[in-house]
Image (cartoon, helix red, strand yellow):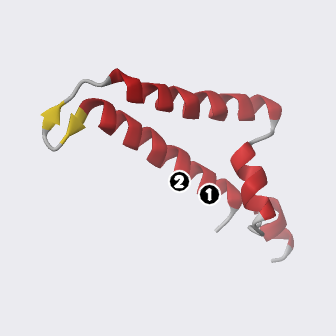
Amino acid sequence: MTVERIIHIVAGFFIMLSVGLASIYNGVVLSEPTWLWFTLFVGVNLFQSGFSQWCLMASILKKMGLKTEASACKSC
């Protein structure tokens, strides 16, 4: 699995989790908008990385030894 795929999976999971926590817990609507700040944080990071080409999570995953799509294709 590549860095880019992991970032998409984690970002999608975090967004779904925070929206779920903001709206429903054990079938009870909590209407807790504080969790939506987490959704905003993930969205802002995705937005800025689109312009700056830098992502903290990508840097961490690369240091852990995961390959990027570009490096994975070179080894084919």
Q: Position of residue 15 (x, y in %)?
A: 45, 39
**Residue matched to label 1:** 5
* Element carrying mark 1: helix
| Residue sitting at x 21%, y 28% | 30
- Asked if residue 39 lies left or right of residue 71, the reply is left
- Of residues 50 and 18, which is closer to you in this image? 18
Quadrant of the frame with the N terminus: bottom right
| Residue at far bottom of view | 76
Q: Amino acid at mark 1?
A: Arg
Asked whether the residues under the numbered discs 1 and 2 touch, taking CB atoms below 8 Å apart as contact, a structural biologist would say yes
Label 2 neighbourhood size at 10 Å, few (<14), some (14-19), many (20+)? Answer: few
**Residue matched to label 2:** 9
The quadrant holding residue 11 is top right
Alpha carbon of mark 1 to alpha carbon of mark 2: how far? 6 Å
| Residue sitting at x 75%, y 66% | 64
| Residue sitting at x 31%, y 38% | 20
Q: Position of residue 18 (x, y in %)?
A: 40, 37
Quadrant of the frame with the C terminus: bottom right
- Of residues 32 and 50, which is closer to you in this image? 32
The quadrant holding residue 49 is top right
